[in-house]
Image (spheres, rainbow, N blue to C red):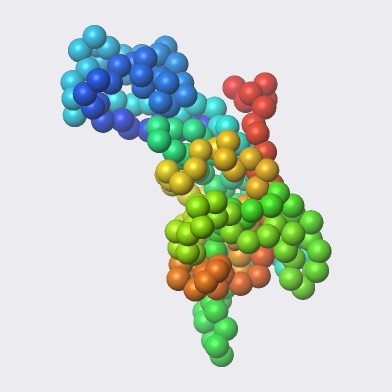
Amino acid sequence: MSDFQPHIMVHEITPGDTFYSLAKQYDTTIEVISKANPEVDPEFLKVGHKILIPLPNPKAIANIRGGPLRPQIQGVVIFYKVKSGTWVCVEVRGLPPYKRAANGQSPIGPHGFHIHEFGSCEVGDPENPFQGAGGHWNPTNQPHGNHAGDMPVLFSNNGYAKMCFFTNAFIPDDVIGKAVIIHQNPDDYRSQPAGNAGKRLACGVITHVNPIYVT
Ligand SMILES: [Cu+2]
Protein backbone atom coordinates (compact mmCIF):
# COMPACT_ATOMS: atom_id res chain seq x y z
CA MET A 1 0.00 0.00 0.00
CA SER A 2 2.96 2.28 0.35
CA ASP A 3 4.93 4.04 -2.34
CA PHE A 4 7.60 5.55 -0.14
CA GLN A 5 10.60 4.49 -2.17
CA PRO A 6 12.57 6.08 -3.56
CA HIS A 7 12.99 9.31 -1.67
CA ILE A 8 15.49 11.92 -2.69
CA MET A 9 16.75 14.89 -0.73
CA VAL A 10 18.51 17.93 -2.10
CA HIS A 11 21.77 18.89 -0.42
CA GLU A 12 23.45 22.25 -0.88
CA ILE A 13 27.21 21.88 -0.91
CA THR A 14 28.94 23.59 2.01
CA PRO A 15 32.70 24.10 2.44
CA GLY A 16 34.47 20.85 3.27
CA ASP A 17 31.79 18.57 1.84
CA THR A 18 32.99 15.49 0.01
CA PHE A 19 31.03 12.52 -1.30
CA TYR A 20 32.59 10.58 1.56
CA SER A 21 31.43 13.04 4.23
CA LEU A 22 27.96 13.28 2.67
CA ALA A 23 27.67 9.51 2.53
CA LYS A 24 28.41 9.42 6.26
CA GLN A 25 26.00 12.24 7.09
CA TYR A 26 23.13 10.73 5.13
CA ASP A 27 23.91 7.15 6.04
CA THR A 28 24.37 6.14 2.42
CA THR A 29 27.30 5.30 0.16
CA ILE A 30 29.61 7.21 -2.18
CA GLU A 31 28.40 4.99 -5.03
CA VAL A 32 24.75 5.90 -4.46
CA ILE A 33 25.54 9.61 -4.43
CA SER A 34 27.74 9.32 -7.53
CA LYS A 35 25.04 7.48 -9.44
CA ALA A 36 22.43 10.11 -8.56
CA ASN A 37 24.68 12.94 -9.74
CA PRO A 38 26.46 11.72 -12.87
CA GLU A 39 27.28 15.25 -14.01
CA VAL A 40 29.00 16.19 -10.75
CA ASP A 41 32.77 15.78 -10.43
CA PRO A 42 33.39 14.79 -6.81
CA GLU A 43 36.87 16.34 -6.97
CA PHE A 44 35.34 19.75 -7.71
CA LEU A 45 32.29 20.22 -5.53
CA LYS A 46 31.17 23.84 -5.70
CA VAL A 47 29.90 25.48 -2.56
CA GLY A 48 26.24 26.40 -2.99
CA HIS A 49 25.57 23.88 -5.73
CA LYS A 50 22.80 21.43 -5.08
CA ILE A 51 23.16 17.70 -5.44
CA LEU A 52 20.70 14.86 -5.02
CA ILE A 53 20.95 12.39 -2.17
CA PRO A 54 18.81 9.26 -2.52
CA LEU A 55 17.61 8.43 0.95
CA PRO A 56 18.97 5.34 2.58
CA ASN A 57 16.76 2.55 3.76
CA PRO A 58 14.46 3.52 6.60
CA LYS A 59 15.79 2.88 10.08
CA ALA A 60 12.53 2.58 11.95
CA ILE A 61 8.89 1.86 11.19
CA ALA A 62 5.54 1.92 12.94
CA ASN A 63 2.59 0.03 11.54
CA ILE A 64 -0.51 2.00 12.46
CA ARG A 65 -3.78 0.30 13.36
CA GLY A 66 -7.06 1.91 14.34
CA GLY A 67 -8.55 1.24 17.75
CA PRO A 68 -12.20 0.80 18.74
CA LEU A 69 -13.09 4.43 17.93
CA ARG A 70 -11.92 4.10 14.32
CA PRO A 71 -10.96 0.54 13.38
CA GLN A 72 -10.73 1.43 9.69
CA ILE A 73 -7.45 3.27 10.17
CA GLN A 74 -4.33 1.59 8.86
CA GLY A 75 -1.04 2.94 7.76
CA VAL A 76 2.65 3.24 8.30
CA VAL A 77 5.15 5.76 9.63
CA ILE A 78 8.73 5.48 8.39
CA PHE A 79 11.81 7.10 9.88
CA TYR A 80 14.90 7.79 7.77
CA LYS A 81 18.18 8.92 9.25
CA VAL A 82 19.32 12.01 7.39
CA LYS A 83 21.83 14.77 8.03
CA SER A 84 21.32 16.21 11.53
CA GLY A 85 18.04 14.47 12.18
CA THR A 86 15.22 12.41 10.80
CA TRP A 87 13.01 12.46 7.72
CA VAL A 88 9.62 11.18 8.81
CA CYS A 89 7.05 9.94 6.31
CA VAL A 90 3.52 8.86 7.11
CA GLU A 91 0.81 7.32 4.98
CA VAL A 92 -2.57 6.51 6.51
CA ARG A 93 -6.00 5.44 5.27
CA GLY A 94 -9.35 5.23 6.97
CA LEU A 95 -9.34 8.49 8.89
CA PRO A 96 -12.83 9.65 9.93
CA PRO A 97 -14.73 12.29 7.92
CA TYR A 98 -14.03 15.88 8.87
CA LYS A 99 -16.54 17.40 11.24
CA ARG A 100 -16.60 21.08 12.04
CA ALA A 101 -16.45 22.36 15.59
CA ALA A 102 -19.90 22.67 17.13
CA ASN A 103 -21.50 22.94 20.55
CA GLY A 104 -18.19 23.45 22.26
CA GLN A 105 -16.76 20.27 20.71
CA SER A 106 -13.46 20.33 18.88
CA PRO A 107 -13.54 19.59 15.16
CA ILE A 108 -12.77 16.07 14.00
CA GLY A 109 -9.60 16.54 11.95
CA PRO A 110 -7.01 17.62 11.12
CA HIS A 111 -5.58 15.04 13.46
CA GLY A 112 -3.10 15.49 16.26
CA PHE A 113 -0.10 13.25 15.58
CA HIS A 114 2.56 12.52 18.17
CA ILE A 115 5.18 10.14 19.43
CA HIS A 116 4.13 8.94 22.87
CA GLU A 117 6.52 7.73 25.50
CA PHE A 118 5.66 4.02 25.84
CA GLY A 119 5.63 1.41 23.10
CA SER A 120 2.28 -0.04 24.03
CA CYS A 121 -0.75 -0.15 21.76
CA GLU A 122 -2.92 -2.12 24.13
CA VAL A 123 -6.44 -0.81 23.75
CA GLY A 124 -7.38 -0.77 27.42
CA ASP A 125 -10.58 1.22 27.95
CA PRO A 126 -12.47 1.06 24.61
CA GLU A 127 -14.06 4.44 25.34
CA ASN A 128 -10.66 6.00 25.91
CA PRO A 129 -8.18 3.73 24.15
CA PHE A 130 -4.41 3.52 24.03
CA GLN A 131 -3.73 5.15 27.37
CA GLY A 132 -0.90 2.64 27.84
CA ALA A 133 1.18 4.68 25.39
CA GLY A 134 1.48 7.32 28.09
CA GLY A 135 1.98 11.01 27.43
CA HIS A 136 3.99 12.70 24.75
CA TRP A 137 7.58 11.64 24.44
CA ASN A 138 9.34 14.62 25.99
CA PRO A 139 12.96 13.78 26.83
CA THR A 140 14.07 17.38 27.27
CA ASN A 141 11.21 18.51 29.50
CA GLN A 142 9.75 21.04 27.08
CA PRO A 143 6.26 22.52 27.07
CA HIS A 144 3.79 21.00 24.62
CA GLY A 145 4.34 22.49 21.18
CA ASN A 146 8.03 21.79 21.56
CA HIS A 147 8.06 18.18 22.72
CA ALA A 148 10.45 16.01 20.73
CA GLY A 149 7.38 13.86 20.06
CA ASP A 150 5.25 16.70 18.68
CA MET A 151 4.65 16.34 14.96
CA PRO A 152 2.59 18.19 12.35
CA VAL A 153 -1.14 17.45 12.26
CA LEU A 154 -2.41 14.96 9.72
CA PHE A 155 -4.72 16.38 7.06
CA SER A 156 -7.22 13.90 5.71
CA ASN A 157 -8.20 13.69 2.06
CA ASN A 158 -11.40 11.69 2.32
CA GLY A 159 -9.69 9.54 4.89
CA TYR A 160 -6.26 9.41 3.27
CA ALA A 161 -3.27 11.31 4.58
CA LYS A 162 0.30 11.39 3.44
CA MET A 163 3.15 13.67 4.43
CA CYS A 164 6.85 13.81 5.09
CA PHE A 165 8.71 16.28 7.26
CA PHE A 166 12.15 16.86 8.74
CA THR A 167 12.91 17.06 12.44
CA ASN A 168 16.16 17.54 14.31
CA ALA A 169 14.50 16.64 17.61
CA PHE A 170 15.62 13.02 17.35
CA ILE A 171 17.31 10.37 15.26
CA PRO A 172 15.43 7.17 14.43
CA ASP A 173 17.23 5.14 17.08
CA ASP A 174 15.88 7.49 19.77
CA VAL A 175 12.28 6.55 19.09
CA ILE A 176 12.55 2.78 18.83
CA GLY A 177 10.15 1.26 21.34
CA LYS A 178 7.91 4.31 21.56
CA ALA A 179 4.46 4.68 20.02
CA VAL A 180 2.91 6.86 17.34
CA ILE A 181 -0.63 8.04 18.14
CA ILE A 182 -3.24 9.60 15.86
CA HIS A 183 -5.84 11.67 17.68
CA GLN A 184 -9.43 12.54 16.90
CA ASN A 185 -9.00 16.31 17.13
CA PRO A 186 -6.46 18.89 16.00
CA ASP A 187 -3.44 19.73 18.08
CA ASP A 188 -3.52 23.40 19.08
CA TYR A 189 0.20 23.27 19.99
CA ARG A 190 -0.42 25.33 23.11
CA SER A 191 -2.78 23.59 25.53
CA GLN A 192 -0.82 21.60 28.10
CA PRO A 193 0.19 18.88 28.20
CA ALA A 194 -1.15 17.46 24.93
CA GLY A 195 -2.55 20.19 22.69
CA ASN A 196 -6.19 19.31 23.38
CA ALA A 197 -6.02 16.74 20.60
CA GLY A 198 -8.66 14.51 22.12
CA LYS A 199 -9.13 10.78 22.02
CA ARG A 200 -6.67 8.33 20.53
CA LEU A 201 -7.91 6.80 17.30
CA ALA A 202 -4.91 4.78 16.20
CA CYS A 203 -1.57 3.55 17.47
CA GLY A 204 1.63 1.96 16.24
CA VAL A 205 4.75 0.83 18.07
CA ILE A 206 8.02 2.02 16.52
CA THR A 207 10.45 -0.78 15.76
CA HIS A 208 13.77 -1.21 14.00
CA VAL A 209 13.65 -1.94 10.31
CA ASN A 210 15.45 -5.16 9.70
CA PRO A 211 17.69 -4.42 6.71
CA ILE A 212 17.10 -7.92 5.34
CA TYR A 213 13.54 -6.99 4.46
CA VAL A 214 14.30 -3.77 2.66
CA THR A 215 15.95 -3.41 -0.69
CU1 LIG B 1 -0.71 12.38 21.25
Say which of 38 and 165 sits in front: 165
Q: In which quarter of the view is residue 47 placed?
A: top left
Residue at point 42% right, 43% down? 168
Judged from the image, the quadrant occupied by ligand 1 is bottom right
Please say whether residue 71 is visible from this viewpoint: no
- In the rendered structure, the answer to whether residue 66 lies left or right of residue 135 reads right
- For this orientation, the residue located farthest to the front is 141
- For this orientation, the residue located farthest to the bottom is 103
Residue at point 57% right, 40% down? 174
Residue 129 position within the rendered picture, expressed as x and y whole percent measured from the top left: 74, 66
Q: Quadrant of the N terminus?
A: top right
Q: Is 139 situated above or below 108?
A: above
Q: In which quarter of the view is residue 58 placed?
A: top right
Residue 78 position within the rendered picture, expressed as x and y whole percent measured from the top left: 57, 40
Residue at point 25% right, 15% down? 40
Q: Is 20 situated above or below 14?
A: above
Say which of 178 and 11 sits in front: 178
Say which of 5 and 170 sits in front: 170
Residue at point 36% right, 22% down? 22
Residue 164 position within the rendered picture, expressed as x and y whole percent measured from the top left: 46, 46
Q: Quadrant of the C terminus?
A: top right
Please say whether residue 172 is visible from this viewpoint: yes
Q: In which quarter of the view is residue 8 placed?
A: top left
Residue 166 position within the rendered picture, expressed as x and y whole percent measured from the top left: 42, 44
Q: How many marks?
A: 0
- For this orientation, the residue located farthest to the top is 43
